Image (cartoon, rainbow, N blue to C red):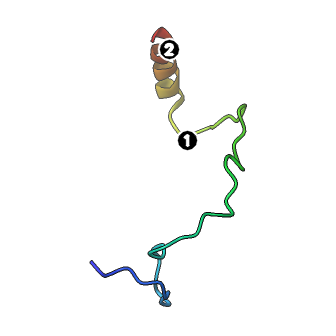
Amino acid sequence: MTQPTDTPTPDDDEMPATVDFSNGVRAKFYHPDAVFILPVDPLVIAVTSRLAWRL
């Protein structure tokens, strides 16, 4: 494993060692009524949904 550095290299896919989030906005992309449709077999979705509603 390599040591983290602040200077990016051309083939660097990792985040830098320090990231400044001071200008970040909390919940910028949050949508309470969002619906996620995952590529899962409909039978699996139906069974797990029924099980989830029992909890």
Bin the neighbour count of mark 1 within 10 Å (Cα to Cα): few under 14, some 14-19, many 20 and up: few
Q: Position of residue 47 (x, y in %)?
A: 46, 19
Q: Is residue 21 above or below residue 6?
A: above
Q: Position of residue 19 (x, y in %)?
A: 53, 70
Q: Position of residue 17 (x, y in %)?
A: 44, 75
Q: Nearer the viewer, residue 50 or 9?
A: 9
Q: Is residue 50 above or below residue 35?
A: above
Please, what secondary structure does the residue beneath circle 1 have?
A: loop
Outermost residue toward the top in this view: 54
Please indicate whether residue 22 sits to the left or right of residue 33 in the image: left
The circle on residue 39 is 1
The residue identified by callout 2 is 50
Amino acid type assigned to the residue bearing label 2 in the image: Arg
What is the C-alpha distance between the residues marked 1 and 2? 18 Å
Outermost residue toward the front in this view: 22
**Residue at figure coordinates x 69%, y 43% from the top left:** 30
Please, what secondary structure does the residue beneath circle 2 have?
A: helix
**Disc count in the image?**
2
The circle on residue 13 is none
**Residue at figure coordinates x 51%, y 13% from the top left:** 53
Bin the neighbour count of mark 2 within 10 Å (Cα to Cα): few under 14, some 14-19, many 20 and up: few
| Quadrant containing the C terminus in the rendered view | top left
Q: Is residue 31 above or below residue 15?
A: above
Q: Quadrant of residue 25?
A: bottom right
Select label 1 or label 2 by which is in front.
2
Q: Quadrant of residue 21?
A: bottom right
Q: Nearer the viewer, residue 17 or 32?
A: 17
Amino acid type assigned to the residue bearing label 1 in the image: Pro
**Residue at figure coordinates x 54%, y 28% from the top left:** 42
Decide which of tag 1 and tag 2 comes sooner along the chain.
1
Mark 1 near mark 2, Cβ–Cβ under 8 Å? no
| Quadrant containing the N terminus in the rendered view | bottom left
